[in-house]
Image (tube, rainbow, N blue to C red):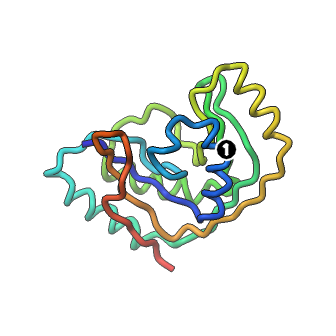
């Protein structure tokens, strides 16, 4: 089964992200807006208890933090993805490292950049148009991050929460 580890930001941030995702993200109906901590990976169900135990340890040793989204950016030319950029990347990077180093140590497709995708699979022209428009938008969103989630993919492509892990207060 396919799993991933993600953070769902506050409902206010999700609302803003979804206002763009409805139009620019074909995955809009499959998962709420998220910040990925671990790229999707295949895992045998027999190894799930070991992963859950590790994620519990990571959560209990990590302080909650705030995220600040401050602008729209893109991964072009690597991929035609547009996203809300996170200003304070350090807490996300630390959490990503704790998870990646110990649990599923597969090489990831791309370097880890904490972000919230608002559009993907856009043509080059559409990407230029959208990022040009959105780069002028004032983005100033905050979200308290006090948990992360192990999610799994159902047969219809929808992602569902397997377990939630609370960070230290």
Q: Residue at x 59, y 64 (%)?
A: 11
Looking at the rendered structure, the number of numbered marks drawn on it comes to: 1
Q: Nearer the viewer, residue 36 or 62?
A: 36
Outermost residue, bottom direction? 169
Quadrant of res 87: bottom right
Tell me the residue that label 1 is attached to. Answer: 20
Outermost residue, right direction? 136
Quadrant containing the N terminus in the rendered view: top left
Vertical relation: 36 (above or below) 123: below
Question: Residue 116: percent from the left, percent from the top?
Answer: 60, 48
159 left or right, relative to 12: left
136 left or right, relative to 88: right
Outermost residue, left direction? 46
Q: Residue at x 83, y 46 (%)?
A: 137
Vertical relation: 166 (above or below) 96: below
Question: Residue 92: percent from the left, percent from the top?
Answer: 55, 56
Quadrant of res 80: top right
Q: Residue at x 34, y 38 (%)?
A: 106
Question: Residue 59: percent from the left, percent from the top?
Answer: 40, 68
Question: Residue 168: percent from the left, percent from the top?
Answer: 47, 76
Vertical relation: 66 (above or below) 4: below
Q: Residues within 10 Å of mark 1 (few under 14, many from 20)?
A: some
Q: Residue at x 40, y 60 (%)?
A: 149
SS at mark 1? helix
96 left or right, relative to 86: left
Q: Nearer the viewer, residue 160 or 142?
A: 160
């Amino acid at each position: 089964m396919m799993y991933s580890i993600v953070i769902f930001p506050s409902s206010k941030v999700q609302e803003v992200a979804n206002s763009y995702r409805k139009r620019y993200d074909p995955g809009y109906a499959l998962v709420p807006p998220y910040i990925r901590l671990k790229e999707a990976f295949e895992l045998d169900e027999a190894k799930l208890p070991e992963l859950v135990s590790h994620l519990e340890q990571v959560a209990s040793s990590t302080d909650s933090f705030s995220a600040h989204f401050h602008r729209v950016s893109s991964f072009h030319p690597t991929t035609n993805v547009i996203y809300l950029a996170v200003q304070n990347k350090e807490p996300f990077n630390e959490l990503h490292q704790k998870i990646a180093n110990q649990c599923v140590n597969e090489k990831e497709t791309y370097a880890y950049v904490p972000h919230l995708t608002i559009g993907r699979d856009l043509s080059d022209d559409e990407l230029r148009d959208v990022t040009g428009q959105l780069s002028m938008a004032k983005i100033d969103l905050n979200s308290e991050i006090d948990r992360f989630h192990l999610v799994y993919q159902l047969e219809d492509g929808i992602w569902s929460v397997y377990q939630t892990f609370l960070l230290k207060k």
